[in-house]
Amino acid sequence: MTFQAITADLVLRTALHVGTGQDTETADDLLRRDARGRLLIPGTAIAGALRSIATRLAPRFDDEKPCQALTGEQSDQACQCLVCQLFGDVNPRDDNEGATAARVLVYDATLNTAPGVQIRDGVGIDRVTGAAARRERIKFDYEVLPAETAFKLRLEIDRRLEKRDKTLPLLAAALAEWEQGRGAVGGRVNRGLGALKLESVCWIERNLSQSDTLIEFLRDGPPWDATDDGRDWLTDRVKAARSLIKPYSGKHPVACSWAVIEFTLAATGPFLTHDLTQAGRSGFDHAPVLATYEKGARPVLPGSSLRGVLRSQAERIARTLATCKAWDAGADAESRKAQFLTTCPACNPLTAKTDDPVASCNSFIKTLPKEERSKFEQQGADGKLCLACQLFGSTWNGSRLRVEDASFVGDKVETKVLDFLAIDRFTGGGRDSAKFDAVVLWKPKFSVRLFLENPKPWELGWLALVLRDLNDGLITVGFGAAKGFGQCKIEEGTLMLGFLHADDFPLPQNDQEPAVQLAIAAGQRLLQAEKELSGIYQTLTYDQTAVDDWTALAEGWINAFNKVVSDPDRRHAFGLKKDSYFDQVDGYWLSDLYPILRGCHERQ
């Protein structure tokens, strides 16, 4: 009998929230604790995150069949795919012949240290006013563990897996994604939380058939702290996994590629992301979010704050282009309105009624029969979602875009204390009870990281336009935009693309347009360059020496986005009833009173 296990240190790169659904007077969602009140990451959360990665990777392993969880199939038979062999059958019914239990046992990850718990605040932003969504009452708070918190990870391996050719390489490939810093666990991962990295991965193996080894094992317990075992196991298994990768021509959402965009976001003046708890501790009405509550803690830009403004600007760009297209396509206001209402590329995710301006995709899906909604839950709802919900996510489809918490860059944190006073519009003096103060950051810099899984060319083009607007000062981040806060510039930006096979590289769809042909040729030249390895992926990083090729490729991505927005074959699955521009008020069309200026979308 052989005992096998994998141990590693799981280190948080951003704050973590693994919720319980329970609330107190201080927070709406508490962190997970054991019966003695000790903080932990449940083994179920870790196993679920690893299984999700493995489910998308497995079909790339030498024509292995996709898991039933990926295809949405309903079957009375056991799946028996590679993933189900590792983590247990996805359809564990008693009458399933061939169903297997999990052969990887994932234990709760316990803390190496005892960090302090923080309270994070969240709020939805109204798409029309740009202020907090008061009508929808989207305000909440929750507990988080700070970045750099370390846990001890332990997995025990059933010895029967060693006899199989691909299961352990698949497990190694999933763990390698975490080792390379592309993993996330817990809740709100797409809003900046739960990013992690594995360190000191170790394979432990003991032959318990030998009496001396068995006695040592029984006397001293499992060798979790072994330092001389299996340090090269992950590297060797990843090499084996890399040799199994094959092109994929199916339609299931398997692992193909990813894009990592990193840059320094530099504020040009005062900057503040408000933390209600920190404000109460400091005695000021407004105070910045800090990494911890300890003295001397450094500021952090929550991923949720940046993600919200990126999505809002992305929606604005898409709707502007669609408005221009509708204006050009219609001869009168009525036909322009009809064109826009059937091709709107970005809904308002905070609305709950179908007759709201630019109503949400979710509000329409809720009107469908239960059978059709159940089908979306099993197979995804991309066909019923606008472009914004496809990229940034919705309550029906999770987002493939993660905007991580951004850490502070630099050694010195410079702050200023500001006083504010509202002016009475009648007297011209100070308004009673309208006095408040704030501690603001002065010209801080943050290290931003965006991760997009399986990027489509139009998605990369859309993000490029949004980040360009952020750099040009058209987007403000955080509190006090009307007061001159939150103006930012982008510094030291870089792009890395990872792909399993050359066929997975995100090239625009081939057509006869010169810009597209140039982009495809540029991408093919870039693929000829020497590539680095990251886990089982090949990678290309933006290189200033090939700036012309990268620029041509980016222009091809933007061209793909423009085509998706204006594609006559892509009709919004639900016709909107009204919007805030193509509408009639008191007998006058707003679009006639405020006409579209010719060339308004040339900048895109």
Image (spheres, helix red, strand yellow):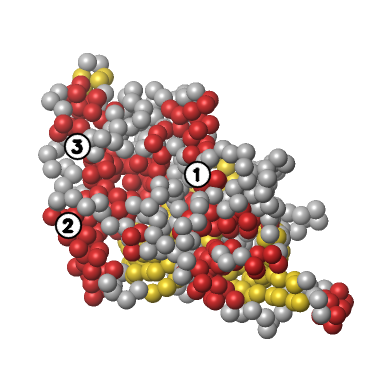
Neighbor class of circle 1 (other Cα within 10 Å; few <14, some 14-19, many 20+) is some
Q: Residue furthest top?
A: 587
- Residue 426, percent from left and from top: 36, 32
**Three-letter amino acid code at disc 3?**
Cys
**Three-letter amino acid code at disc 2?**
Gln
**What residue is disc 3 on?**
324
- Residue 439, percent from left and from top: 49, 57
Q: Residue at x 50, y 68 (%)?
A: 241
Neighbor class of circle 3 (other Cα within 10 Å; few <14, some 14-19, many 20+) is many
Q: Secondary structure at mark 3?
A: helix
**What residue is disc 2 on?**
517
Q: Which comes before the other along the chain, label 2 or label 3?
A: 3
Real-space CA distance between mark 2 and mark 3, rounded to the nearest whole angstrom: 26 Å
**Three-letter amino acid code at disc 1?**
Thr
Quadrant assignment, res 383: top left
Q: Quadrant of the N terminus?
A: bottom right
Asked whether, in this view, residue 138 is left or right of residue 3, the answer is left
Asked whether, in this view, residue 433 is left or right of residue 472, the answer is right
Asked whether, in this view, residue 134 is left or right of residue 49, the answer is left
- Residue 236, percent from left and from top: 54, 76
Please state which of residues 240 and 131 is positioned toward the viewer in this rendering.
240
Q: Residue at x 25, y 16 (%)?
A: 586
Residue 15 visible in the current orientation: yes
Q: Which comes before the other along the chain, label 3 or label 1?
A: 1
**What residue is disc 1 on?**
71
Asked if labels 1 and 3 touch by Cβ distance under 8 angstroms, the answer is: no
Asked whether, in this view, residue 545 is left or right of residue 267, the answer is left
Tell me: residue 32, above or below residue 74: below
Q: Secondary structure at mark 1?
A: helix
Q: Residue at x 66, y 52 (%)?
A: 88
